[in-house]
Amino acid sequence: MEQFILILERMYTLEDLQIFKDNPYDTMIKYTVDTKRKVIAIGGEMHADSEEVLLKNGSNSKDIWGANLLPWQEKASIEYISLINIRPPINKKMEIEIPEIREIVKQITIQWIKLDYEDALS
């Protein structure tokens, strides 16, 4: 199956996200956020795939962070975990450890993807 990755140019709903179901994952969608430009590239098998799309579209790698969206649960949630998030010395793990960056990723996600999110998006 060919990878499907796009940069969001409008608000997406749960119905819109159906195009990503089983492509390639059935319960989540990998995506990357450019925290400076406030854009999202969504889809692909690995975060590096959507990161590459953002880089080709003018983003800088230091501004791109990866996350996983789990939209098909009762309450949608975000996992702030990706290999591209490992950036010693500022972020030494796959999970985004910097609270300010997590909050920016969350706010940009909510701006572009309208879902019923868990109250405690942490």
Image (cartoon, rainbow, N blue to C red):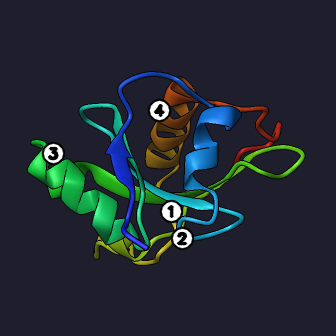
**CA gap, disc 2 and disc 4:** 23 Å
Q: Between disc 3 and disc 2, whose residue precedes? A: 2
In the rendered view, tell whether residue 13 sits above or below residue 97: above
- Decide: marks 3, 2 in contact (CB < 8 A)? no
Disc 4 crowd, CA 10 A, few/some/many (<14, 14-19, 20+): some
- The residue depicted at 14 percent of the width and 53 percent of the height is 55
**CA gap, disc 3 and disc 1:** 22 Å
- Judging from the image, what secondary structure is the residue with disc 3 in? loop
- Of tags 4 and 1, the one toward the viewer is 4
- Identify the disc placed on residue 59: 3
Disc 2 crowd, CA 10 A, few/some/many (<14, 14-19, 20+): some
Residue that label 2 marks: 24
- Identify the disc placed on residue 108: 4
Q: Between disc 3 and disc 4, whose residue precedes? A: 3
Q: Between disc 4 and disc 1, whose residue precedes? A: 1
**Quadrant location of the N terminus?**
bottom left
Q: Between disc 2 and disc 4, whose residue precedes? A: 2
